[in-house]
Image (tube, grey):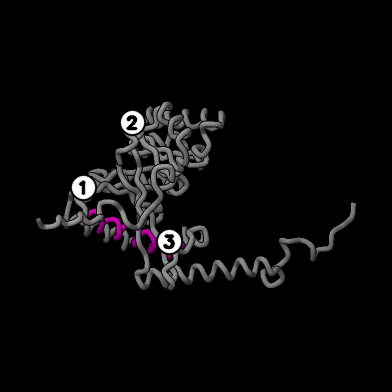
């Protein structure tokens, strides 16, 4: 067998020797720099996507507020360019702070709104994030009853003991919790029993095209059954067409979310101005 020269080994090549790696590294650095600038200037907003009741597809159960970070030209910086890099850094905690602050502000403005906000389990011990939450709740205790905090499965499993204590404390204040992207990670069912999540959001990889995929049908029905067993509300993510929605309804899902119903929007319906009546 022919021996390869050591210089051919990708693992031995540095970024300076690999133009593609250098380009990717520079792109990532630029994205992180843009995210820091946006957070410092307040160039962030939430886009709202409805979560629909499966038994009554015209009824919104609640909304999810998705953080949007803007570049200097007002364009959204794609999350894929920075989300993995910031997850374990303080920049990730600042993103969680921005999302929470915007979400609580919208809840205060809109008394009929119920809103889910994403967070990382790493933010549980972040002092600024906790100050934002506690200050809002001290001003209006009813905000907690309309707030849902979404934690991804992979994030929750990083520190399950801390998450369970945090959830118990927050649930006393009326806050609900959703386990996001369920099925994508490796949740131990013993922890699932102890977490006390209120909502189980099934990862979109099992939902897209489910009407024509027997394997995903079996897996999704099993996840719905798990949610029902643990008395959790089930939500199917990434519902993109009518046939998938119909299958999920018949499978017993509680709620559905996806582009079939609505794309995330920065102009939610509750902000629409009621046209003034013309005088006779």
Span colored in magenta: 89-108
In the rendering, at what x and y percent does residue 130 appear?
Answer: 29, 58
- The answer to whether 38 is drawn above or below residue 45 in the figure is below
Relative depth, front residue between 262 and 119? 262
Helix, strand or loop at disc 3?
helix
Res. 55 mark: 2
Q: Is residue 166 visible?
A: no
Q: Residue furthest right?
A: 1
Which of the 4 image quarters holds residue 128? bottom left
Residue 107 included in the magenta stretch of the image: yes
Helix, strand or loop at disc 2?
loop
Residue for badge 1: 112
Structural distance between the alpha carbons of marks 3 and 2: 37 Å
Q: How many marks?
A: 3
Residue 166 included in the magenta stretch of the image: no
In the rendering, at what x and y percent does residue 94 appear?
Answer: 38, 64
Structural distance between the alpha carbons of marks 1 and 2: 21 Å
Which of the 4 image quarters holds residue 75? bottom left
Q: Are marks 1 and 2 in contact (CB under 8 Å)?
A: no
Q: Residue furthest left?
A: 280
Q: Residues within 10 Å of mark 3 (few under 14, many from 20)?
A: many
- The answer to whether 58 is drawn above or below residue 118 in the figure is above
């Amino acid at each position: 067998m022919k021996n390869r020269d050591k210089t051919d080994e990708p693992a031995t090549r540095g970024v300076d020797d690999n133009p593609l790696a250098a380009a990717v590294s520079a792109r990532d650095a630029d994205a992180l720099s843009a995210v820091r600038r946006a957070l410092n200037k307040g160039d962030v907003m939430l886009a709202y996507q409805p979560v629909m009741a499966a038994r009554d597809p015209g009824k919104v159960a609640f909304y999810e507020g998705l953080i949007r970070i803007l570049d200097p030209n007002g364009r959204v910086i794609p999350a894929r360019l920075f989300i993995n890099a910031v997850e374990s850094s303080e920049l990730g905690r600042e993103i969680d702070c921005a999302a929470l602050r915007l979400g609580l502000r919208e809840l205060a403005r809109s008394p009929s709104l119920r809103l889910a906000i994403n967070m990382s389990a790493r933010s549980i011990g972040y002092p600024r994030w906790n100050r934002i939450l506690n200050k809002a709740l001290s001003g209006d205790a009813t905000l907690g009853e309309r707030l849902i905090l979404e934690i991804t499965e992979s994030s929750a499993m990083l520190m399950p003991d801390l998450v369970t204590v945090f959830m118990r404390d927050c649930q006393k204040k009326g806050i609900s919790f959703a386990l996001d992207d369920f099925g994508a990670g490796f949740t131990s069912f013993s922890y699932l029993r102890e977490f006390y999540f209120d909502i189980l959001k099934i990862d979109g990889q099992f939902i897209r095209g489910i009407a024509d995929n027997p394997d995903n049908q079996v897996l999704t029905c099993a996840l719905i059954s798990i949610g029902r067993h643990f008395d959790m509300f089930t939500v199917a993510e990434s519902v993109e067409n009518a046939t998938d929605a119909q299958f999920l309804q018949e499978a017993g899902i509680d709620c559905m979310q996806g582009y079939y119903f609505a794309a995330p929007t920065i102009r939610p319906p509750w902000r629409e101005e009621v046209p003034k009546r013309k005088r006779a």
